[in-house]
Amino acid sequence: MSAPRESAAAVQREVAQLQRWMQHVCTHPRGVAHALTTAESKAEYDVTVDQLERLVPPSKALSGLDRISIYAEMYVLRLLDVLREDFPVLLHALGPQRFEELARAYVVAHPSRHYNLNQFGRHMSAFVATRDDKHAAFLAELAQLERAATESFDAERADALGRAELEALRPEQWPALALRLVPSARVLAFRHPVNRYYVDVREGRKARIPKVGASWTLVYRKDWIVWRAQLSREQHALLEALASGATLGRALEKCAARTELDAAKLQQGLAAWFREWSAEGIFRSLG
Amino acid sequence: MTATNRWNLPDLGIGVALRSKHYPHILAKWPEVAFFEVLSENYMTTGGRPLWILDQIAERYRIVLHGVSMGIGGTDPIDFEYLRELKALAARTKAVWMGDHVCWTGIAGQNNHDLWPVAYDEPTLKHLVERVRIVQDFLERPLVLENASTYLEFAQSSMPEEVFIRRLADESDCALLLDVNNIYVSSRNHGFDARAYLDHVPWERVVQVHMAGHTDHGTHCIDTHMGEVRQEVWELYAEAMRRGGAKPTLLEWDQDIPDFETTHAEALKAQLYLPRAAKAAS
């Protein structure tokens, strides 16, 4: 029984060698010709650019290098398109050239590892934060907001807590109530007014990279459309506590313990906030 | 309509690849369409609007699933989580069949989101046959594999693509999706005779045909799925249908996608090229 297994393993090694080589040379940021000079390429097949046609023969019209370069070019262009589509406001903020530089660097640092391309941009915010750019902190937050919208779009469906369900609750039930956010909801805190910049760009207004200024945003999906809502500091604190699993009573205690929050604002706003949030469907049904 | 394949899978007629641009038209008009082909990965690991729309479409139309990320020719371990998702999507949409391409898509955990060519040699054939068998066992149905467009050949290949695919199908007992545009594109890129390619097609295994536009760069052609199907590809289609009998045929249009009626009308041109008897039946 062991012989066929060894044979299968040998077959796989042989097939894998060609695939490792092709992936290396087609995804190298400096192109196929340069990739052929690298140790990784030579470890698989020790061919120079002049010897490439030993592996990839020419056609009547194209050299072996031309032919394999078709795959290399399509590889990066496809992924750049995905990033442009997922981060249109980041693209606006950077301009096409700087965005492309960023995106090409991202493709190298974080090659796709999932079949759903919507997951490709998930490291962008952290990646932008490490870039040598005086606005890196703002740009990272902008990427975080755009990424949250992509995640919200794809999130699992869940029945939302409706107004009737909310109003049916007796007052004594409220403190122990464990309200959970629907999977599409994202509660975000920023050091810059990111959502305001985002809205300005999307609505065609002139937008400058803003100065530091705390802001809080709720991203959620309603009727299959992704929305963003500006939050106050108090609203954010409450939703963040609920999202972490606290009961409503515990969430309010947590908020009360935070001296930077306006206790009166919190108490006065509570009923209206919950009406609004339940109308927007951001809590899971209790059923 | 009569099945013309060894699994008695039905002849679905002439269909269109489902694309998001057409959602509003389909949901508003519920046009008469024989079947829709769905790009599997667009509806896997998502709970958003596309899946909600697909659920509605699958209630009214026959669906087939067509993937681009199975990587059946790859050498990473088979991704059973992917296959579980795919199987669940097939059950959800009551898919008549599901398939992917004769290609690989990445190695060492990477997904290059493209259909990269395999070498047409004995080791690769053996490797693919083994993997197709495993996948079919898991999916509990024949896998429908498509010939991809290719832009290079490997010197180590020891047989032509059509022989490789025929042997793959025979030895793994899989079904085939014959992409006529891909045959044409590859024939131009590699300088082989597209009609001679048809000599090797195991017609009893072909359950579906793809048609699409391509971009001719003079030195080579790229399978862009853009524009109308070129006349020479329709002629090759007519020849294929004459040899193999009418097969379910689907149009793919993925760049500069026109309105639904234009797309569907382009697909229905296939009727003009079907063998006479099948034309009368359709």
Image (tube, rainbow, N blue to C red):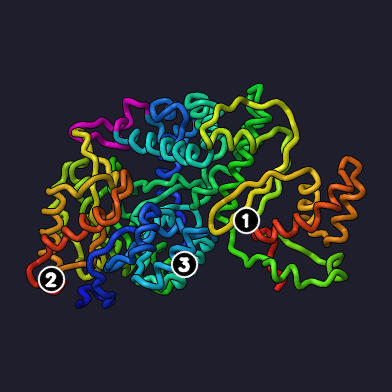
- Would residue A49 be counted in the magenta stretch? yes
Magenta-highlighted residues: A48-66
Up-down: is B21 above or below A40? below
The chain ID associated with circle 2 is B
Q: Please say whether residue B246 is visible from this viewpoint.
A: yes
Q: Which residue is mark 1?
A: A184
The chain ID associated with circle 3 is B
Q: Residues within 10 Å of mark 2 (few under 14, many from 20)?
A: some
Q: Residue at x 40, y 50 (%)?
A: B104
Q: Which residue is mark 2?
A: B278
Residue type, mark 1 in image: Ser
For this rendering, which residue is in front, A59 or B274? B274
For the residues labelled 1 and 2, the Cα–Cα distance comes to 49 Å
| Nearest to viewer (mark 3 / mark 1) | 1
For the residues labelled 3 and 1, the Cα–Cα distance comes to 21 Å
Residue type, mark 2 in image: Ala
Mark sitting on residue B89:
3
